Amino acid sequence: MRYRGDERWHLVELRAAQTANLSNTLLLVVLIVCPLFVSRATTFTLQRVTLFGLLFIGARNAIELFASLYWDRRL
């Protein structure tokens, strides 16, 4: 609450969002490339796809949190 309306905090949020968007690109590339090296016998069930989706969202949120902490101390 102490950062409400502060221009510096808006810059921190912007930088953290940019970092998270960059990580989205890297995570998606990894998710697209990894199945190329997995055997063709592996099946993707709905439960497994849901788990990967939740892990992706959790990883993105964690990256954005740590980026916010980093940019908050840096700026």
Image: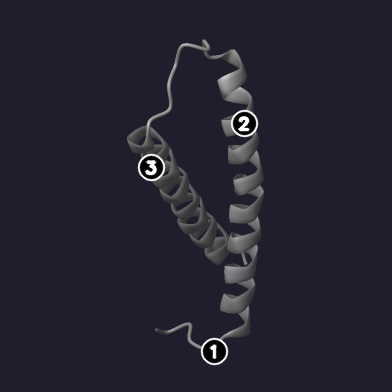
Q: Which structural element holds mark 1? A: loop
In the image, residue 41 sits, relative to residue 21, either above or below, namely: above
Front-lying residue, 47 or 19:
47
Amino acid type, residue under disc 2 in the picture = Ile
Q: Is residue 30 left or right of residue 68?
A: right
Residue under label 1, please give it. Answer: 5
Q: What label sits on residue 50 in the rendered view?
A: 3
Amino acid on which disc 3 is placed: Thr
Q: Position of residue 36 (x, y in %)?
A: 62, 18
The label on residue 65 is none
Q: Quadrant of the C terminus?
A: bottom right
Dot 1 or dot 2, earlier in sequence: 1
* Rendering colour mode: one colour
- Mark 3 or mark 1: name the one nearer the start of the chain: 1
Distance from label 3 to label 1 (Cα)? 37 Å
Identify which residue, 43 or 61, lies in the foreground: 43
| Residue 24 in the image, given as x and y percentages of width and height | 60, 47
Q: Nearer the viewer, mark 1 or mark 2?
A: 2
- Which quadrant of the view contains residue 72? bottom right
Q: Which residue is mark 2?
A: 32
Q: Earlier in the sequence, mark 3 or mark 2?
A: 2
Label 1 crowding class (10 Å Cα cut-off): few <14, some 14-19, many 20+?
A: few
Q: Is residue 34 above or below residue 29?
A: above
